[in-house]
Image (cartoon, coloured by chain):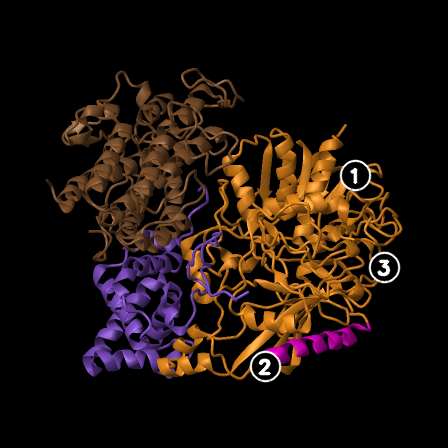
Chain colours: A orange, B purple, C brown
Amino acid sequence: MKVETLIIGSGVAAAALSQRLLGANPDAAILILEAGAKVKMQDAALWEDYLITGKLPYDKYKDLPYPERDEPGQNLSIGATEVPLTGSRVMTYGGSTIHWGGWSFRLKPEDFALKTNTGQGIDWPFDYDELEPYYGQAEAYIGVSGDSHDPTVPRSEDYPFPAFPYTLEDQPVARSMSSLGIQYSHLPIARHGITDTTSRHAPCKTTGTCKYCPFGARYAATNFLNDMFQWCAYPNFEVRVGCVVQEIVLDGKSVAKGVVYYDKARGETLRVEADRIIIAAGAIESPKLLLRSTSDHWPNGIGNDHDLVGRNLITHPYFMFNGVQKGNPLKLQPEMNFPTLCSRHFDSPEQQQKGKFILINPPSSPGVNLEGAMQAGMVREDIDQAVLGQNQVQLHGMVEVFSELPNRVMNLDQINQIGLKETIVDYSKAAGFDRRMEEIKQHVQGIFEGMGVELLPKVSISWRADHAACTCRMSDDPSQGVTDRHMKVHGVDNLYVCSNAAFSSLGAVNPTLTLTALSLRLGDHLISHPVA
Amino acid sequence: MYQQQVRHPLTQSLDSLDGETFEAMFELFRQIGIFWRNLDDAEAYRSRLYAFMQNRINLRPIYHQYYQLARQTLDQLIAEQGQEQAYRLLFTDAQANQPPAETPLAVTRQKVSNEFVTFQLAQGGFRVFGADNYPGFIGGANIPGQPAPYRTAEE
Amino acid sequence: MQSLQEQKNALFPLLQTAMELELSTIPPYLTALLSIRPEANRVAANLIRTVMMEEMLHMTLVGNLTASLGGRVALGEGNLPAYPLSMEFEGQRFRDRQFEVDLAPFSEAGLDTFMQIEMPTDWMDREPSYKAFAEIEVPGITIGAFYQMIEQQLAQMCAQYPESEVFCGDPAHQIDENYYWAGGGKPVVITTLASAREALQLIIEQGEGAGGGLMDGDRHYFDQPLEVAHFFRFREIAFGRHYRPDDHPKEPPTGTQFEVDFAAVYPIIRNPKAADYGGDEQMARWNHQFNAAYSLMLDQIAQAFNGNPEVLYTAIVNGMHSLTPVARQMMTTPIAEDPEGRHGGPSFEWVPPPYASKGAG
């Protein structure tokens, strides 16, 4: 069989791109191949199970931890810095938006000129203004609640839904930041609100159980794809789950012809041909697929003549500072389970050279745990005292790091529970990173002091690969990047990488909104460049 | 609307929860609110507790037995110690809270009582501790012009 | 002169009838919708879905009106529609219910029935007798006229008594916009005659269209490209074509065409009863499971209307979300050894929840 557009992976990139293509032509022939399975959404029993046990119905589609002496584990970490894959992604229909937090930041204009401004990494092949209209469309598509008057990033249209007000838990942080002249703003978040338009997607009911929303209010590609299949008349739109793409097949050097995939349910290896192929399999799997698609024309893998595929890997170190507050007279406690206050004060041109960072007031602070107290058998009086008394306080954030050639992902010759090849991750943090964290700590200490909170010495830093990026980065120069300004693989006419892998750099913020904008932009590009 | 059901295959052949076991479990739920003084109107939660228990069984059929065992255990404990002391023991006994649950009392505590505590807090039991919203509580939407469904900062 | 309470007591049975009337449309719409094979008729399926959603809103509005007057709603054994259904009022059939409503697969004939249900007053053979509004015994009343009659009785009460005494129910016990989405319109919390009129008008206009036009009357809430009233949405399916804004209501639609395939449906049993599944243990089990969940949900909806609105969330998340998978399972499965080769379908019969409900009274 032959389709017009073949998309590998079914996450937000695939969902947004197909939405755009089908919006222009409802008869467009699009096939999505997804290695993972479907997860039942909005199920009361599964939701309550998550509430009670913390277990999610898609936990089994996450990577296992790296091997330990007594545990076989999965994948290999061979660099000096361990970048855990466990928990960083979900290999399922709908991809990682099934579990994400929904934080929906735009990059800032200076992020597009990283090399020019700092000498680090590379510039993006286009500037912020090019992407700005697509940011607006992406916010409308994934349904972002945000503050349209927030001056942090220029915008030409309002958010579709108003920002969630700051919680009372935000108050001490906000006051301290104000006194220090540190700007803060509403965290833009992909939770549907209420407006005067009907939507099949429910508005957020602030259940605080976003990892498995009983209403489907937090954007998940799973829900949006389901909606397209259930209620839209797209006769030639298809998704096949349980289909693991083994390699891309070329016709000569510069034309992608199709893919070979293994259909797990049928137990067969099959082929499908396509006019154009979009790899939308995330920053880990996308380069791995190119790397294992070797031929006489591309002995090192497709698009890899400059040995860049899978390289330049970065993610966001996510830091958690802990402190102790002596008393809690306002009985502050986790009410929401998603944050409402962030600061992009240090996500600025002045900080770009050293690594921009953002700060988040997490909803888990102060760490009052009513459930734990009652289950442990504490009586009411003791719980009341514990709520009012000394509590742990946190401030979170993430910092930009820069791509370096040796950091990369590769295929490991073992198959995981999904049927995908496991991953070798080779990452070592830069020499100056610890010094940068010390600087960040000074800022956090100041904020904590303003809150009357004593900073604890230990800082947790997670290098988890949630925001892995740049492994097939865009550059107009094939010696600098794997893909061009339209995320097309250099040297192949009809093969694209629509993923965080194509980011030229990552900035200091969550990548999903930018990926959504890039996907919609790619959709427009494909519509205006129909296949011959 | 077109999604598949999520049910354990074994629950197909199980009888649904019987009225007597449910009433015993509802009494346990009510006693949680009495012991911690955090939920006055347990009656308003009757059908929600029933739906919750039915869902636990649908997902894991063994819950059918857990609930029956909890009923027997509580009946016996109440006969021996009286109602107030029986529930106090169930809610506070440190031994019964140690996993794995290997005694009837430990099963009742860990698989029933502790789960009901989580459920009860999320249904509204959290309010007496000072907050307006709580993870698992359906607080309502963020509607422009109306108060937020949680405590907000003064700006 | 009747006391206010006497007047209210005379109105409550009408509101209970209204509640049952709105509820009665939902099982036939849901059955037709789910009987459609998922790969076909997506436009038609979506149109039926939106009408069904708005019928849920109408139930909510009637529930709010009842609560606003200090009344109670009953949804349980004895108040549930049984199919084939003909709606009666005061011993008389509704004039626009001179036909039977079936639980049946999506079909041309079924669509005719749906159009009958939603038919605007001005499409009827004769105009309703407005003179009769003051009396309760109105033979051959239409649904639109029925709601106008309720509105008039409210106006009479408010002319005699302060609105705060007429609408004495606690507004916190009503269902607000938090509880309704994915369909047109919004719940109206009723505290005044004006808000009561807004709610009743919304019901009438979403069903029949506003003032003899195509539009469904909730356009002041919604910036939709074109959301036509229920009757006209079914006409769109019948013609396989959308309306355009300037189309004449009494002429066929002239907008975009879409495919309607009446063959692409599962051959489900008409008006099933639990007894029909005696020879198919699995189907009987699914049907019981469906009915138990349906009954639990209705009991919770009644509790929500009777002063405990939060329970509606459980009715939505636990009830509504769990009914359709079972119904689909039944409809995609042939009934064992059925000589006609029919597939199953839920019977929408009452299975008492095994707890003593204190709220559904």
Q: According to the image, label 2 marks what residue?
A: A452
Q: According to the image, label 1 marks what residue?
A: A250
Q: Chain of mark 2?
A: A
Residues at discs 1 and 3 both on one chain: yes
Residue A434 colored in magenta in the image:
yes
Magenta stretch bounds? A431-451
Q: Nearer the viewer, mark 1 or mark 3?
A: 3
**Kind of residue indicated by mark 1:** Leu
- Indicate the quadrant containing the C terminus of chain A: top left, top right, bottom left or bottom right: top right
Residue A8 placed where, x, y %? 67, 44
Against A52, residue C301 (above or below) is above
Q: Are marks 2 and 3 in contact (CB under 8 Å)?
A: no
Residue A309 colored in magenta in the image:
no
Residue C275 visible here: no
At x 43%, y 35%, the residue is C218
Identify the mark nearer the N-term, 2 or 3: 3
Q: Chain of mark 1?
A: A
Q: Secondary structure at mark 2?
A: loop
Magenta-colored segment: predominant secondary structure = helix
